[in-house]
Amino acid sequence: MKIFLSILIACSLLASCATTNVKPMYYWNPTVKVKNKNDKTALVSTSYVNTLWALKKTPTDDSKKAYANQLLYIIEASNNNNANVPPGVYAEYGYILLLGGQKDESLKYFKLEQQLYPLSNAYIQKIITKIENNK
Protein backbone atom coordinates (compact mmCIF):
# COMPACT_ATOMS: atom_id res chain seq x y z
CA MET A 1 0.00 0.00 0.00
CA LYS A 2 2.88 2.35 0.84
CA ILE A 3 4.44 1.67 -2.55
CA PHE A 4 1.17 2.46 -4.31
CA LEU A 5 0.77 5.74 -2.40
CA SER A 6 4.40 6.65 -3.09
CA ILE A 7 3.94 6.06 -6.81
CA LEU A 8 0.68 8.01 -6.81
CA ILE A 9 2.30 10.98 -5.06
CA ALA A 10 5.34 10.86 -7.37
CA CYS A 11 3.07 10.83 -10.45
CA SER A 12 1.04 13.73 -9.07
CA LEU A 13 4.18 15.77 -8.45
CA LEU A 14 5.55 15.03 -11.92
CA ALA A 15 2.23 15.87 -13.57
CA SER A 16 2.08 19.20 -11.77
CA CYS A 17 5.47 20.09 -13.28
CA ALA A 18 4.19 19.59 -16.81
CA THR A 19 4.14 22.67 -18.98
CA THR A 20 0.80 24.31 -19.65
CA ASN A 21 2.14 26.47 -22.47
CA VAL A 22 0.46 24.49 -25.24
CA LYS A 23 0.34 26.02 -28.70
CA PRO A 24 -3.24 26.27 -30.00
CA MET A 25 -4.14 24.14 -33.00
CA TYR A 26 -5.67 27.05 -34.91
CA TYR A 27 -5.03 30.77 -34.86
CA TRP A 28 -8.04 33.00 -34.09
CA ASN A 29 -6.56 36.41 -33.36
CA PRO A 30 -9.17 38.77 -31.90
CA THR A 31 -7.69 41.90 -33.51
CA VAL A 32 -7.87 43.25 -37.03
CA LYS A 33 -5.84 45.87 -38.88
CA VAL A 34 -7.96 48.79 -40.02
CA LYS A 35 -6.94 51.86 -42.00
CA ASN A 36 -8.57 55.09 -40.91
CA LYS A 37 -9.28 58.18 -43.03
CA ASN A 38 -5.66 59.33 -42.76
CA ASP A 39 -4.37 55.97 -44.11
CA LYS A 40 -2.91 55.11 -40.72
CA THR A 41 -3.13 51.47 -39.72
CA ALA A 42 -4.55 50.68 -36.31
CA LEU A 43 -5.40 47.46 -34.50
CA VAL A 44 -9.05 47.33 -33.57
CA SER A 45 -10.14 44.91 -30.88
CA THR A 46 -12.67 42.81 -32.69
CA SER A 47 -13.00 39.19 -33.62
CA TYR A 48 -14.17 36.82 -36.26
CA VAL A 49 -17.44 36.29 -34.41
CA ASN A 50 -18.12 40.02 -34.05
CA THR A 51 -17.45 40.79 -37.71
CA LEU A 52 -19.56 37.82 -38.83
CA TRP A 53 -22.40 38.96 -36.57
CA ALA A 54 -22.16 42.52 -37.91
CA LEU A 55 -22.32 41.19 -41.49
CA LYS A 56 -25.37 39.03 -40.77
CA LYS A 57 -27.12 41.74 -38.76
CA THR A 58 -26.43 44.62 -41.17
CA PRO A 59 -25.13 43.38 -44.52
CA THR A 60 -23.44 46.52 -45.85
CA ASP A 61 -20.29 47.00 -47.90
CA ASP A 62 -18.48 48.13 -44.75
CA SER A 63 -19.49 45.05 -42.74
CA LYS A 64 -18.56 42.79 -45.66
CA LYS A 65 -15.17 44.50 -45.95
CA ALA A 66 -14.55 44.21 -42.19
CA TYR A 67 -15.42 40.51 -42.31
CA ALA A 68 -13.18 39.90 -45.32
CA ASN A 69 -10.35 41.78 -43.59
CA GLN A 70 -10.78 39.63 -40.48
CA LEU A 71 -10.67 36.42 -42.53
CA LEU A 72 -7.57 37.58 -44.41
CA TYR A 73 -5.95 38.61 -41.14
CA ILE A 74 -6.62 35.17 -39.65
CA ILE A 75 -5.05 33.56 -42.73
CA GLU A 76 -1.97 35.79 -42.63
CA ALA A 77 -1.54 35.54 -38.87
CA SER A 78 -1.90 31.75 -39.00
CA ASN A 79 0.80 31.52 -41.63
CA ASN A 80 3.07 33.93 -39.73
CA ASN A 81 2.64 31.96 -36.48
CA ASN A 82 3.08 28.51 -38.08
CA ALA A 83 -0.44 27.55 -37.07
CA ASN A 84 -3.15 25.92 -39.16
CA VAL A 85 -5.73 28.18 -40.71
CA PRO A 86 -9.00 27.23 -38.96
CA PRO A 87 -11.39 24.99 -40.91
CA GLY A 88 -13.65 26.89 -43.29
CA VAL A 89 -11.73 30.17 -43.23
CA TYR A 90 -10.18 29.68 -46.68
CA ALA A 91 -13.59 28.70 -48.06
CA GLU A 92 -15.35 31.67 -46.43
CA TYR A 93 -12.76 34.08 -47.78
CA GLY A 94 -13.05 32.46 -51.21
CA TYR A 95 -16.82 32.92 -51.07
CA ILE A 96 -16.46 36.62 -50.18
CA LEU A 97 -14.10 37.03 -53.13
CA LEU A 98 -16.55 35.18 -55.38
CA LEU A 99 -19.37 37.52 -54.34
CA GLY A 100 -17.08 40.41 -55.28
CA GLY A 101 -16.60 38.98 -58.76
CA GLN A 102 -13.03 37.73 -58.23
CA LYS A 103 -13.54 34.20 -59.54
CA ASP A 104 -9.90 33.27 -60.16
CA GLU A 105 -8.77 34.50 -56.76
CA SER A 106 -11.70 32.74 -55.06
CA LEU A 107 -10.76 29.45 -56.73
CA LYS A 108 -7.30 29.73 -55.18
CA TYR A 109 -8.79 29.89 -51.68
CA PHE A 110 -11.32 27.11 -52.27
CA LYS A 111 -8.45 24.89 -53.45
CA LEU A 112 -6.40 25.78 -50.35
CA GLU A 113 -9.36 24.73 -48.18
CA GLN A 114 -9.60 21.49 -50.11
CA GLN A 115 -5.87 20.76 -49.69
CA LEU A 116 -5.71 21.58 -45.99
CA TYR A 117 -8.96 19.81 -45.08
CA PRO A 118 -9.46 16.78 -47.37
CA LEU A 119 -12.74 15.88 -45.66
CA SER A 120 -14.23 18.97 -47.30
CA ASN A 121 -13.28 17.65 -50.75
CA ALA A 122 -16.73 16.53 -51.91
CA TYR A 123 -18.42 19.82 -50.99
CA ILE A 124 -15.62 22.14 -52.10
CA GLN A 125 -15.16 20.27 -55.39
CA LYS A 126 -18.82 20.94 -56.26
CA ILE A 127 -18.25 24.66 -55.66
CA ILE A 128 -15.04 24.66 -57.72
CA THR A 129 -16.72 22.82 -60.60
CA LYS A 130 -19.64 25.25 -60.59
CA ILE A 131 -17.30 28.27 -60.63
CA GLU A 132 -15.18 26.80 -63.43
CA ASN A 133 -18.26 25.99 -65.52
CA ASN A 134 -19.61 29.54 -65.16
CA LYS A 135 -16.45 31.32 -66.29
Image (tube, rainbow, N blue to C red):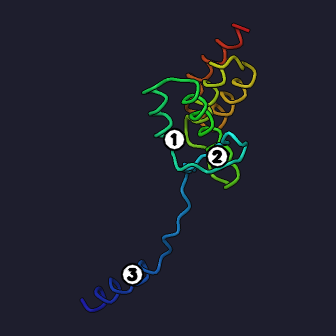
Image height check: is 58 above or below 101?
below
Q: Foreground mark, 3 or 1?
A: 1
Query: Nearest the camera: 131 or 52?
Result: 52
Residue drawn at x 64%, y 50% is: 42
Going from N to C along the chain, the mark reached first, 1 or 2, is: 2
Q: Which quadrant is home to the N terminus?
A: bottom left
Specify the amino acid type for callout 2: Lys
Give the residue pinned by disc 2: 33
Tell me the quadrant of the picture where the C terminus can be found: top right
Q: Residue at x 69, y 24 (%)?
A: 106
User: Looking at the image, do the residues carrying marks 1 and 2 touch, with CB atoms under 8 Å apart?
Assistant: no
Task: Please state which of the two labelled residues, at mark 3 or mark 2, is closer to the viewer.
Answer: 2
Left or right: 70 as drawn, with respect to 80: left
Residue 81, position as x, y percentages in the image: 67, 55
Total numbered labels placed on residues in the image: 3
Image location (x, y in percent) of residue 70: 59, 40
The residue at the point 31 percent across, 90 percent down is 3
Which residue appears at 39% of the width and 84% of the height? 13
Q: Amino acid at mark 1?
A: Tyr
Q: Residues within 10 Å of mark 3 (few under 14, many from 20)?
A: few
Task: Tell me the SS state at disc 3.
Answer: helix
Determine whether the residue tagged by mark 1 lies in a helix, strand or loop.
Answer: helix
Element under label 2? strand
| Residue that badge 1 annotates | 48
Closest to the observer: 74 or 8?
74
What is the CA distance from the residue labelled 1 to the residue labelled 2? 13 Å
3 or 2: tag closer to the N-terminus = 3
Q: Which mark is residue 11?
A: 3
The kind of residue tagged 3 is: Cys
**Do tag 3 and tag 2 residues touch (Cβ < 8 Å)?**
no
